[in-house]
Amino acid sequence: MVAFFSFLSGYILSQFFRSFLAVIAPELGHELGLDPQALAALQTAWILGFIVMQFPVGWALDAWGPRRTVPVTMIAAVIGALLFANAQSGFTLQIALALIGIGCSAIYMGAVYVFGRIYPPQRFALLCSWLIGIGSAGNLIAASPLALATSVIGWRGAILVMALVTALVALLLALIIRNPPRVTTARAEGLIDGLKIILSIRALWPLLPLATISYAVIIAERGLWAGPFLSDVYGLTPVDRGFILLIMATAMSIGALIYGPLDRVFGGYKWISVIGTALSAAG
């Protein structure tokens, strides 16, 4: 389980960085003069940095292994966090968040890669569920704790602390993670070849729009707009906003923890996905 807890520390950071803007967005807007369009561009920068790297990360995991891929990409997150903490303009914040997105891009996929290679298949779903559920503690940290830290040392100081933590976690992963045994193939596959293989899996096609739409709601609300909404409409302080976001993050963590074991109850993930999507739509 050493590999699990090592990746867990990185995934907690990844969850923090994809949701921390919701707490400090009003302060960013006031201090740097950012309008709603500029704030939206910040979240977009993180998402683009994260998404664009997924295919290169998949190739790098096969070519170099997680021991090199994950810590090296996390260096970008460290640089991005340092840049964010010292930013004086919206454009600099965009660059910083794009770097953070790049730095977080290999953490989850690296964990899945290792879990699939070194643990029994029957434990794969459970481990991924635990990783997402416990790793959602990053969302919790990016709620009330971040709000409290911001009220004491400011948002710049809080992000500087997270930059240091990210550097330490990257070092931890570099020292602890070992590459699993490689699966030999008839020939080496390049990035384009790997992409073609993925797109040829027809079972993924109906899942792509579902994942895209459902995650868009979460990343938009929890990742950014919930904070400004609570500030502008209800006049809540950062600490009060953080408490409400903490409730949402807690619900996300609980859901992630219980979804994995439920596949044995329902005999698969189809109805779990249907019920979960329906609950999100109702909310």
Image (cartoon, helix red, strand yellow):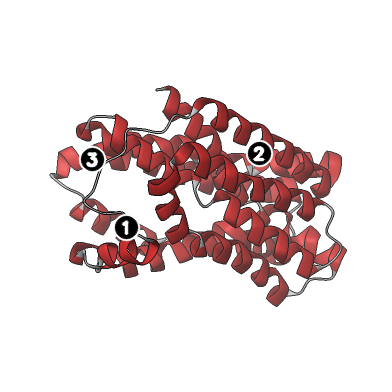
Residue, disc 2: 166
Say whether residue 180 is left or right of residue 197: right
Residue, disc 3: 262
Camera-nearest residue between 125 and 261: 125
Which quadrant is home to the C terminus? bottom left
Which quadrant is home to the N terminus? top left
Camera-nearest residue between 216 and 75: 75
- Mark toward the viewer: 1 or 2: 1
Three-letter amino acid code at disc 2? Answer: Thr
Residue, disc 1: 189
Residue 103 placement (x, y as % from top left): 59, 50
Task: Work out whether mark 1 precedes mark 2 in sequence or the reverse, and give the earlier one.
Answer: 2
Viewer can see residue 255: yes
Give the residue drawn at x 32%, y 33%: 181
Q: List the single residue furthest toward the left.
A: 267
Determine the CA span between mark 1 and mark 2: 32 Å
Determine the CA span between mark 3 and mark 1: 35 Å
Q: Quadrant of residue 191?
A: bottom left
Q: List the single residue furthest toward the top.
A: 2
Residue 279 placement (x, y as % from top left): 34, 57
Element assignment for label 3? helix
Task: Work out whether mark 3 precedes mark 2 in sequence or the reverse, and give the earlier one.
Answer: 2
With respect to residue 14, does 201 lie above or below? below
Element assignment for label 1? loop
Three-letter amino acid code at disc 1? Answer: Glu
Camera-nearest residue between 237 and 17: 17
Viewer can see residue 18: no
Disc 1 packing (10 Å; few <14; some 14–19; many ≥20): some
With respect to residue 149, does 99 lie above or below? below
Say whether residue 256 is left or right of residue 205: right
Q: Quadrant of residue 163?
A: top right
Residue 141 placement (x, y as % from top left): 62, 39
